[in-house]
């Protein structure tokens, strides 16, 4: 009797499992989350860039969904990853700059999925995501050790921390390790987090990409930086392709939710700054987001805007799992299945890491900077820099004409939004202060708060 009932129960179980997923489809068993460090949406051909930098991302988008307007909550690696992993704003978990540990007590995506019985691993490519900063929480395996000889960055110290090992590694090494781990999972459901670092400076693409992305000898510094950056993006995209092909070869692609995004963009001298961290202009915070998996119709384009703070609840929702309570992010899974965004008018708030120095290079910086995007408008304020900016992103997507003086009522209304947001999102202090020597060192480097 029991033997005859088992297939019926199994079928019933399948039916139940499929209830929350569209078209009666079972939700994805596994999750592959890929974060490319320093990848601007605007430099990917998947988002309309003229140079074909990301054919693999384009293909993934054709097989799944692309979200047109996606904001990283900050332009800094550690804080954005803290938000990705908790579904909360960086200031509300006390991670407002790099090298600050993610405090205990905020449930992470990996913890949620490990509790649900998934095998979990993180393969990262930069010291900024080292386990000493708590990003490994909930992961059964965290691969963050790099050869010094193979690193592209020569730092032996970073924000007061001494490095025993290399600072970073190339995408090809990271892909190899990710595929090795996947091959060992043996059919168990998994959550694999893969972080690539190559588009981050220094822009030193591997030789074949240097040849493909040749720079004219008389090119301006801006053009030269962009071409080398594009070469790094293209190399990373090819590695994402190799990772996805490996997933396919293992027979796991059909049951795996894949999400590819970035932790922030890059200045590339659009507003006079080459790197990230200091500004909240579009090039520093607009990132790609492509998702593919069971329940996501192929070729879907969702306009957004959404924040990466929303990604944790969205991924959990797509996997038919509850989100932790009290988070700031909201799931946009229904929109991916063809529905509407739960709150399309919701303002998107961005925050910059806090500086106590007066400048980074030639750029004046001081204290906190916040921005809010609402509809076509974007307002940026840095009280200690005594600077307020208002842009009409529809008529001025490059943020060239500051309308704060011309549209005082609109600027004031958006400033009020930020007042409310600050109240609703209190900043908590960093989990563990750095040592006095480290503090001194950070001060000297202009990094300390
Ligand atoms: Zn980063």
Image: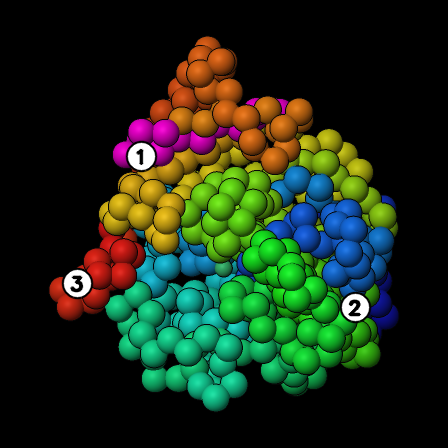
Q: Earlier in the sequence, mark 3 or mark 1?
A: 1
Spot occupied by residue 142 in the image (x, y as percentages of width and height): 49, 76
Q: Residue furthest top?
A: 409
Q: Which mark is residue 385?
A: 1
User: Front-most of 245 and 406?
Assistant: 406
User: Front-most of 370 and 294?
Assistant: 370
Spot occupied by residue 90 in the image (x, y as percentages of width and height): 40, 47
Residue under label 2, please give it.
253
> Disc 3 versus disc 1: distance between alpha carbons?
23 Å
Residue at image position (63%, 33%) is: 397
Question: Quick check: can you spot residue 79?
Answer: yes
Structural crowding at the residue carrying mark 1, measured as other residues with C-alpha within 10 Å and reported as few (<14), some (14–19) or many (≥20): some
Marks 2 and 1 close (CB-CB < 8 Å): no
Q: Is residue 311 above or below residue 338?
A: below
Spot occupied by residue 299 in the image (x, y as percentages of width and height): 85, 48
What colour scheme was applied to this rendering of the protein? rainbow
Spot occupied by residue 190 in the image (x, y as percentages of width and height): 63, 70
- Please, what secondary structure does the residue beneath circle 2 have? helix
Image position of 271 (left or right of 357): right
Q: Which part of the image, by quadrant, shows the N terminus?
A: bottom right
> Disc 2 versus disc 3: distance between alpha carbons?
49 Å
The magenta segment: 374-387
Image position of 184 (left or right of 9): left
Q: Earlier in the sequence, mark 2 or mark 3?
A: 2
Give residue 375's quadrant in the image. top right
Image position of 39 (left or right of 127): right
- Please, what secondary structure does the residue beneath circle 1 have? helix
Image position of 347 (left or right of 186): left
């Amino acid at each position: 009797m029991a033997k005859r009932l088992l297939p019926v129960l199994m079928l019933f179980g399948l039916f139940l499992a499929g209830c929350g997923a569209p078209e009666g489809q079972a939700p994805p068993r596994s999750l592959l989350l890929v974060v490319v460090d320093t990848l601007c949406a605007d430099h990917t051909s998947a988002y309309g860039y003229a140079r074909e930098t990301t054919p693999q991302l384009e293909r993934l988008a054709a097989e799944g969904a692309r979200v047109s307007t996606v904001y990283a909550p900050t332009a800094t690696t550690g804080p954005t990853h803290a938000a990705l992993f908790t579904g909360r704003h960086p200031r509300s978990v006390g991670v407002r700059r790099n090298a600050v540990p993610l405090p205990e007590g905020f449930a992470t995506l990996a913890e949620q999925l490990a509790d649900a019985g998934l095998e979990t691993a993180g393969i990262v490519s930069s010291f900024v995501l080292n386990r000493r900063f708590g990003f490994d929480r909930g992961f059964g395996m965290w691969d963050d050790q790099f050869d010094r000889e193979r690193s592209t960055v020569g730092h032996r110290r970073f924000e007061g921390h001494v490095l025993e090992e290399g600072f970073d590694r190339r995408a090809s090494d990271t892909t190899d390790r990710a595929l090795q781990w996947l091959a060992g999972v043996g059919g168990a459901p998994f959550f694999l987090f893969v972080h690539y670092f190559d588009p981050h400076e220094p822009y030193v693409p591997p030789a074949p990409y240097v040849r493909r992305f040749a720079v004219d000898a008389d090119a301006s510094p801006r053009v030269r930086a962009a071409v080398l950056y594009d070469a790094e993006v293209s190399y990373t995209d090819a590695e994402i392709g190799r990772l996805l092909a490996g997933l396919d070869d293992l027979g796991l692609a059909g049951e795996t939710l894949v999400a590819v995004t970035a932790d922030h963009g890059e200045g590339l001298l659009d507003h006079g700054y080459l790197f990230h961290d200091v500004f909240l202009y579009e090039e520093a915070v607009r990132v790609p987001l492509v998702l593919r998996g069971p329940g996501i119709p192929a070729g879907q384009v969702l306009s957004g805007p959404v924040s990466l703070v929303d990604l944790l609840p969205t991924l959990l929702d797509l996997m038919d799992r509850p989100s932790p309570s009290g988070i700031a992010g909201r799931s946009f899974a229904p929109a991916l299945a063809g529905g509407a965004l739960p709150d399309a008018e919701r303002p998107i708030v961005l925050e910059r890491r806090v500086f106590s120095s007066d400048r980074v290079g030639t750029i004046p910086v001081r204290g906190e900077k916040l921005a809010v995007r609402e509809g076509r408008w974007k307002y940026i304020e840095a009280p200690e820099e005594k600077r307020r900016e208002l842009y009409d992103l529809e008529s001025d997507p490059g943020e060239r004409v500051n309308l704060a003086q011309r549209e005082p009522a609109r600027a004031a209304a958006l400033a009020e939004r930020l007042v409310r947001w600050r109240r609703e999102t209190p900043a908590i202090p960093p989990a563990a202060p750095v040592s006095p020597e480290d503090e001194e060192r950070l001060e000297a480097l202009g990094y300390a708060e």
